[in-house]
């Protein structure tokens, strides 16, 4: 995943007395850059971003920006998705080491072989995949639009879904489809502790348990609401409930609290840890200092092979077109 760029600049010293918010803002204006941040970023990065969103929203913003530079505060596959959509723009990420265990659970050669073994199947890939996997895909989905995109194919269509087995199982269960699933998973969403969630339910009997579909089936089964990061956020805004036990990466709680300051958000804890909340170690590699250095030095840039880009843009565009038609 790392390019051959030097990555030493990422940790270049930043003066301690520097007002990072002002410095980042100045650079962004000077360079006609925009900052896109995923909800799993730290609060300070979310607050300075031009746009915050889930995977679908970030791709939608990237597709329509007129900025010269796009800084993607998220993980590598998100930067790749933006570069595929905007091949002529400079796409930067604050830390090139920000990978994704789910994308890593789907090595491109093995996935291509799996696809080859099922030539009569439509290939549906979750956005959490590398560009090379997207290049052998018919349509990309995110957790916000997976159900509707799967249902846009006639009943009986043979389908492969990769790489998240939990999201795939969940979509199969709510659509009645029988997609063949790749056996991949996200180490963050698979780590929630059922025991601790059940304890929290006893402690907060009026709370809704809200869960991302990358979580394991038993956690989904004890949940009151299941949805993508954006859907969970929307649910907390619309719901009359005052307390929510949140089973997804805890970064999204920052925006939930901002949107609903009168409500209480309790992060669901992971297994095997004394930690009360669950963070993605990859997402959290990005910092304000690295964001500043990335804009200042215009590194680390994301590159995608031209041939791969030309193939991978088709299933991403297809996703964006279907999402637009469905008003997502
Ligand atoms: P969404 O942003 O589509 O909800 O996906 C969650 C995730 O794990 C991103 O890495
Ligand atoms: Fe990947 Fe999971 Fe982190 Fe999302 S939370 S970036 S799926 S490792």
Image (spheres, helix red, strand yellow):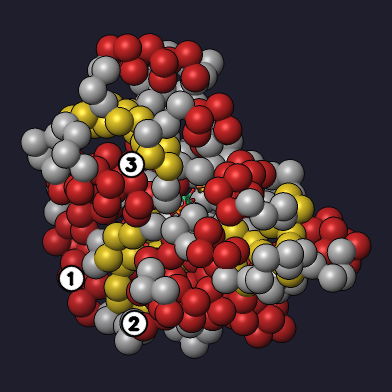
Q: Position of residue 8 (x, y in %)?
A: 49, 54
Residue placed under numbered mark 2 in the picture: 65
From what the image shows, is residue 311 above or below residue 128? below
Q: Position of residue 140 (x, y in %)?
A: 59, 68
Question: Around disc 2, counting alpha carbons within 10 Å, would you say few (fewer than 14), some (14 to 19), or many (20 or more)?
Answer: some
Quadrant of the image occupied by residue 250:
top left
- Which label sits in the foreground, 2 or 1? 2
Q: Is residue 83 visible?
A: no
Mark 3 or mark 1: which comes first in sequence? 1
**In the figure, is residue 37 to the left or right of 113?**
left
Quarter of the image where one finds residue 56: bottom left
Indicate whether 147 appears above or below 196.
below
Residue at 33% in and 41% down: 251
User: What SS does tag 2 mark?
Assistant: loop
Expressed as whole percent of the image width and height from the top left, the position of residue 132 reads: 71, 68
**Residue 263 occupies which quadrant of the picture?**
top left
Task: Determine which residue is flagged by label 1.
Answer: 26
Element assignment for label 1: helix
Q: Is residue 38 visible?
A: yes
Instruction: Tell which of 245 and 311 is nearer to you.
Output: 245
Side of 325 relative to 172 (left or right): left
Residue at 55% x, 48% y is 174
Q: Is residue 313 above or below residue 44?
A: below
Identify the disc placed on residue 251. 3
Please, which residue is most extreme toward the right here? 117
Q: Quadrant of the C terminus?
A: bottom left
Q: Is residue 232 left or right of residue 179?
A: left
Residue placed most toward the observer, 150 or 77 = 150
| First reached walking from the N terminus: tag 2 or tag 1 | 1
**Residue at image point 87% right, 70% down:** 119
Residue at position x 67%, y 55% in the image: 177
**Image coords of residue 305 (percent x, y):** 67, 78
């Amino acid at each position: 995943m790392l390019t051959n760029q030097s990555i030493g600049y990422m940790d270049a010293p930043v003066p301690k007395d520097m007002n990072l918010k002002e410095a980042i803002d100045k650079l962004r204006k000077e360079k006609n850059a925009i900052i896109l941040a995923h909800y799993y970023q730290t609060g300070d990065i979310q607050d300075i971003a031009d746009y915050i969103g889930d995977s679908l929203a970030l791709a939608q913003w990237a597709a329509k920006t007129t900025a010269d530079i796009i800084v993607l505060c998220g993980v590598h596959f998100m930067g790749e998705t933006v570069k595929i959509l905007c091949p002529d723009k400079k796409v930067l990420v604050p830390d090139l080491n920000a990978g994704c265990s789910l994308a890593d659970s789907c090595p491109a050669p093995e996935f291509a072989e799996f696809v080859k073994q099922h030539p009569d199947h439509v290939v549906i890939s979750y956005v959490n995949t590398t560009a090379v996997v997207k290049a052998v895909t018919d349509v990309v989905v995110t957790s916000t639009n997976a159900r509707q995109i799967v249902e846009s194919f006639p009943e009986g269509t043979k389908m492969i879904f990769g790489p998240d087995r939990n999201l795939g199982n969940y979509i199969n269960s709510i659509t009645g489809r029988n997609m063949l699933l790749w056996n991949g998973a996200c180490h963050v969403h698979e780590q929630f502790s059922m025991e601790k969630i059940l304890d929290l339910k006893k402690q907060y009997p009026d709370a809704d348990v809200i869960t991302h579909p990358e979580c394991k089936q038993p956690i989904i089964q004890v949940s009151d609401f299941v949805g993508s990061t954006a859907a969970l956020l929307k649910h907390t805004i619309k719901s009359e409930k005052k307390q929510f036990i949140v089973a997804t990466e805890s970064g999204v709680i920052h925006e939930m609290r901002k949107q609903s300051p009168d409500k209480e958000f309790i992060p669901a804890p992971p297994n095997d840890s004394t930690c009360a909340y669950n963070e993605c170690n990859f997402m959290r590699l990005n910092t304000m200092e690295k964001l500043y250095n990335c804009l200042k030095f215009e590194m680390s840039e994301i590159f995608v092979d031209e041939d791969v880009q030309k193939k991978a843009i088709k299933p991403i565009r297809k996703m964006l077109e279907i999402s637009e038609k469905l008003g997502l």
